[in-house]
Image: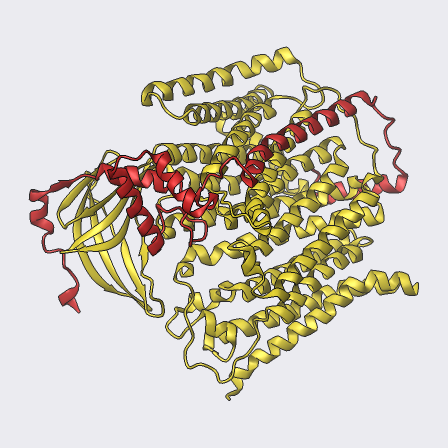
Chain colours: A yellow, B red
Amino acid sequence: MPFSLQLVEFGHLAAHLALAVALLQGLAPLLARATGIPALRRLSVSAAGVVFLLTTIGAAALIHAFVIGNFSVKYVAQHSNEALPLFYKVAALWGGHEGSLYLWVWVLTFFTLLVVWRGRREYPDHLPVILSVQGWLTVGFFGLILFLSNPFDRIFPAPAEGHDLNPLLQDPGMVIHPPMLYLGYVGFSVPFAFAITALLTNWKSELWSGLIRRWTLVAWGFLTTGIMLGGWWAYYELGWGGYWAWDPVENASFMPWLLGTALVHSITVQDRRRMLHTWNIFLVIATFSLSLLGTFLVRSGVLSSVHSFAVDPGRGAYILAFMVVVLGVSFGIFLVRGRYQQAEEAISSMWSREALFVWNNVVFTVACASVLLGTLMPLVADAFGHKITVGAPYFNLVLVPIFLLALALMGTGPLVPWRKANLERVGRRLAIPFSAGVSAALLLWFVFGNQYWVGPVGVGLVAFVLTTLGLDLNRSVRIRRAQLGEALPRAVLGTVLGNRRHYGGMVVHLGIAIIAVGIVGSGLFRSEKTITMAPGDVVEVGGERLRFDGVRQLPGPNYRSIQARVTIEGSGRAVYPERRTYLKQEQPMSETGIDSTPLRDVYVVMAESAGDGRWGMQVYVNPLVQFIWFGGFVIISGLALGLSRKRKPATESPARATA
Amino acid sequence: MRAFLLVCLLAVPAVVLADKVSEDPMERRMLDIARDLRCAVCQNQPVSESHAPLAQDMRAIIRDQLKTGKSPDEIKRYFVDRYGDYVLMKPATRGFGAIVWIGPVLLFVIIGIGGLVFLRRRLRTSLPAPVALSAEDRKRIDRARREDGGA
């Protein structure tokens, strides 16, 4: 066997060594205490670097095996073949169970390295304990990877050719979606490690809450990006006209997002008002636990059926045991030490921004718990021998009112001051947004007639939020102009850049409002038709006239395709949906044809041939879908603004002097 | 290669002939029912979207029953009798399904009361004396603030 095919064994060895060194990283502070040699604590710092290096060697070896087509590696043979484009060969690393877990642990070791990089200067005394927590997580994952789902496993004799990467995954959206999600999941491991360290070492929350705020926002941002990309991929690739199906796999990523959203808000309160310390530690632990749960729900196969969990009993038992240990140990520590700091400031009034933040946390915790209930109840019922389904109609019915409540809070919060609100003044401030909301709702009611109540209420709340945001900015800009006499654009820029934390958050809220518009538009005002068309036929749907022109054969790198042309009369543009047959797979796949304008998407999916050149077609006109993707972009921009730092005062002051 | 590139020869005359096709209203009614039923062999997919043979059969049954004049509820009951509550995308309000329906309401009440109790307790505790920071801690906070960009 040529040497290049054996290179993967170096990676395998490196992964085993990484497990051993990670064990050392986890043990170091314990060893230091047991032996009474404090210097041993430092071992975990050096170990973290070595673990990342070794894990990277393992990943490089796997990617190399994919690129050269080393089918003696079972995982490569299952998820790649010669004809697969290079881009997808590399991405196939996370195309299956074993590789996904490897990516997870690789990201974990990378984040650990970042913690070391910042921590040597900023929190050297606590660094070994933080690294120890992350070391144990690394050990847990490597144990699962190396002993129960090993991507380095070989098969002899090696097959001449591999299977294929699942065609659904051969899409750029699906290539970036899992890493983004994992950056989010694993990102929450850093606040988790800080929280556990704080509990163990009585670390004063003033000293660490600022440090985890940035990590939490970054993790939340990656998770948001991952979820948005997942929705975008589902919309373009799956061909049912929607982007969110409340599938358990989607819920698995949505639960940590919901609790993470509660966390990014309550951390602000902790930072600004010195309260909610204990609750925040609880939230951090719970959010990370849900990240773990999400990874395992998706990866264990338990979702398709409780019984598929038992197909590989070792793996299932390990995952369950790992979850129990992580939950047991972290909540155990929390229960024993969680009340260590009760020196919280009191709340001066029920009508204050901090009180509204508490209600935000209530709303998002209820949302998360409801999704958890709906996602896990079928598994619980199954374990008792009953089979039930909890599908999209249920989740829409339960979660939509909760989200509307969240929108209402989102519009009110920024207008209510910290500490104590003057109710009369807040009432005056809310008058304009409130009337804007009511007008928008009534307008929608009159334009579209009798309709599902969520439409007008949703649109009204969005108008309320947008007006609030506008008024909030307007107030600050006016004060600034009165004081500094600046021109309007300069004053707006100065206001926003002068308080990046606040306006970063407001831009994120703007993004959420834009997404809400998109969801109302596409969810409630969608038109669809399922028809059979012969070339030349025209169908009318949602005010658009679509003409089926015919089909043609189209060869691809690893598939054959039949492509249809459907012209949108009016604009004259065309969409090209496809039926693809991948050479390694039996089932033909549909590629959607989409024509997007800011106000609506024309979305065409080819179904089966009906003979005589006639084809089954599903045509949708989805209003305002583009708002959703644009809103996602706005959210990430807001986050970047909130996380950006002002230039150093040294460079800023001369600029101001000349201005 | 070029020979099979275009099959859409009809494209130009088609504009003139433009035959308008409309959706079979029966098909729409069928899909509206199929959306609430789960394809029993699929992973969390409604019958309306699945390509599985079973889903096709189920769609055919819905069509037949619609033709005999059955109401949507009767058709759904027909499937529940055969496959159990499992086929309903929106769980029935009995057994484990009932828990799923009561759950969110209970959660809202419990967590909401929790929030209220928390706020009330925090309100009643008079403002505690500010925690006296040691000189060393004060220095660390100042240092941390400075390094955080003065925020």
* Residue A37 in view in this figure: no
Q: Height in image: A459 above or below A566?
A: above
List x then y, in percent, for residue A153: 57, 76
Q: In the visual, does B46 lie left or right of A248?
A: left
Nearer the observer, A274 or B30:
B30
Q: Quadrant of residue A366?
A: top right
Residue reaching furthest to the right: A36
Residue B66 percent across, percent down from the top left:
27, 38
Left or right of B40? Residue A471 is right
Residue at image position (57%, 29%) is A495
Q: In the rendered image, which quarter is residue A582 located in?
A: bottom left
Q: Give the residue displayed 69% in from the left and 24% down from the top.
A: A418
Q: Is residue B32 above or below residue A72?
A: above
Residue at point 45% right, 17% down?
A: A438
Q: In this view of the protein, which residue sits in the foreground, A546 or B1?
A: A546
- Along the viewing direction, whichever of A390 and A411 lies nearer the viewer: A390
Measuring from the top left, give residue A144's x and y in whole percent.
64, 65
Q: Residue furthest top?
A: A424
Residue A280 percent across, percent down from the top left: 72, 39
Say if A146 sits above or below A430 in the image. below
Q: Is residue A461 left or right of residue A283?
A: left
Residue at x 53%, y 23% (from the top left corner): A468
